[in-house]
Image (cartoon, grey):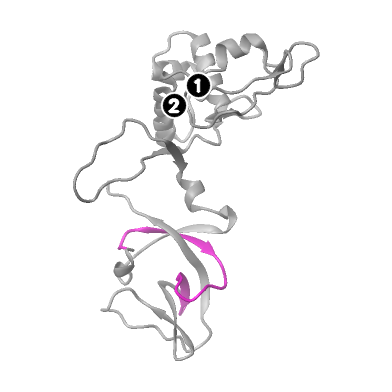
Amino acid sequence: YSNDRRLSGSAPGEIGSVPIFHSNACSPASHRPLRRIDRRTIVRYGRCVPDDRQYLGRLQDYYAKHRVLPSYARIGELVGLSSKASVAEMVMRLKGERFLQSTPDRRLKPGARFFERPVAEHVRAGMPGPAADTAAETLAIDAHLVSNPSRTVLIKVKGDSMVDAGILDGDTVVVEKRTSADIGDIVVAIIDNEFTLKHLAREKGRIVLRPANKAYPVIRPKDDLEIFGVVVGQFRSYG
């Protein structure tokens, strides 16, 4: 179906001067105007259906394993849709919600919201509480941890000198490359041409590197301290 047709005299995203909006049936975001779309397309594509979340999950699992999205025929096999038209309609709905998009050569690729994950309001560390079936919002991990992609690197932690700060051996820290930092920041500094992860601290007017483990000594650089970056996040896998 073409999404380039519209009624004469109507502006893009309108039918007879009435704005057309996405339904919020499959995401909390609503009232985003659809552009260049006709009445027939609205009827068929303008509303997400409950199964779309399940379809999206299968596409996310496939992408995590293969790092590429499947063909339309393979999508039908993955989600259990037998007709090409049904697959095309489902893909169009996910595109409308920005979970999918197309490359210039018309291949599918992840959209801006593809990597969002459901966020629960809280989890009890004490007595159990009731579990909600659905999350009220979503979160893309990369967008949450990375503010400046061109200056951000991931560094694997080796050692236990920062355990009292909650950073364990084997964790991965998200580091924003900077040449300066504030006192109290957790920094990656360069000492004797090697990286070290420590708190930036001040001692008797001098800048020092303080571990978060009493078994390790404070590092007091003899020369000027070179800072590689500041830790802005961390994560670990329990798998």
Q: Which residue is drawn at 57% across and 59% down?
A: 151
Q: In which quarter of the image is residue 197?
A: bottom left
Above or below 78: residue 167: below
Q: Residue furthest bottom?
A: 204
Foreground pick, 223 / 25: 25
User: Which labelled disc corresponds to residue 71?
Assistant: 1
Q: Which residue is drawn at 49% across and 20% down?
A: 48
User: Which residue is label 2 attached to?
Assistant: 56
Q: Residue at x 42, y 86 (%)?
A: 220
Q: Quadrant where the N terminus lies?
A: top right
Q: How many labels does the image show?
A: 2
Is 104 included in the stretch rendered in magenta?
A: no
Above or below 80: residue 215: below
Left or right position of 71 against 79: right
Q: Give the range drawn in magenta.
A: 168-193
Foreground pick, 237 / 24: 24
